[in-house]
Image (tube, rainbow, N blue to C red):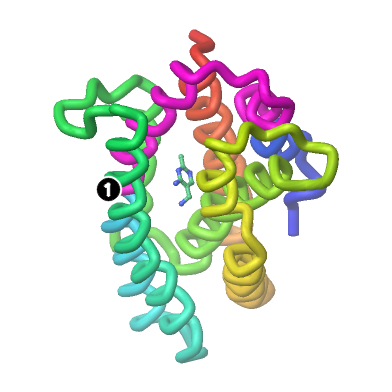
Amino acid sequence: MWAKKHLLYTGATRQPFILSIRDGSVDLSSFKRWLGQDYVFVREFVPFVASVLIKASKKSDDGNDMEVILGGLASLNDEIAWFKSEASKWDVPLSNTVVHKANQNYRRFLENLMLPEVDYAVAITAFWAIEAVYQESFAHCLEDGSKTPSELQDTCQRWGNEGFGEYCRSLQKIANRCLEKASSDVLTKAEVTFLRVLEHEVEFWNMSHGCA
Ligand SMILES: Cc1ncc(CN)c(N)n1
């Protein structure tokens, strides 16, 4: 996969906000900003994942794809409940959140990817990349030597745990299988989309960290 090939991937998975959680220097206002914004993101992510599920059921030559994606969709149900409980723990209001620019831009990007004319190979690559950035970022905060504050462990575990890692690897296998038989045109579209995901993730972390 291109992940290793692009420096942007390192930028997206070792972004200052993530590094500040890992070294324990994160300020809670940044964390609370991220929490409120990511709740908005996840609610937009649900229809995107549903659109990938529809594409898989229509276009995939392997019925297992639909089951993997369905599993991801189901976990978003628990994820929304987790956000609500975490937000009440931190006194972060989840209603009428002002949606920051980076989040609005990401939402528009996801909406475009939901269009029926977007190839399944492109959509599944974006889906894998979106999940993988979070998995690698938060897993980094759980590695030996990290000084992640105990009150943020739960957040890091949510995406950094081994089970989510397994799930991301199964998405990567699906994406690779689709890309192996894709036309060069679709391959190019998928790589451009992969890079766009990384850019949006970097912008999302920057927004959370309070960078302009
Ligand atoms: C911005 C963002 N990117 C990815 C994920 C993981 N589904 C997330 N919760 N938020």
Q: Is residue 68 above or below residue 136?
A: below
Picture quarter with the N terminus: bottom right
Q: How many residues crowd around disc 1 within 10 Å: few (fewer than 14), some, or many (20 or more)?
A: some
Relative to 6, 199 lies left or right: left
Residue identified by numbered label 1? 43
Residue sitting nearer the eye, 82 or 131: 82
Relative to 55, 97 lies left or right: left
Residue sitting nearer the eye, 13 or 154: 154
The residue located at (54%, 27%) in the rendering is 205
The amino acid type found where label 1 is placed reads: Arg
The residue located at (54%, 21%) in the rendering is 206
Q: Residue furthest top?
A: 212
Q: Position of residue 156 (x, y in %)?
A: 58, 45
- Residue 174 among magenta residues: no
Residue sitting nearer the eye, 123 or 142: 142
Q: Is residue 172 above or below residue 41?
A: below
Rendering quarter of residue 103:
top left
Secondary structure mostly taken by the magenta-highlighted segment of the chain: helix
Q: Is residue 90 above or below residue 86?
A: above
Give the extent of the magenta segment.
15-42
The residue located at (52%, 67%) in the rendering is 121
Is any atom of residue 114 visible in this view? no
Q: Position of residue 115 (x, y in %)?
A: 29, 56
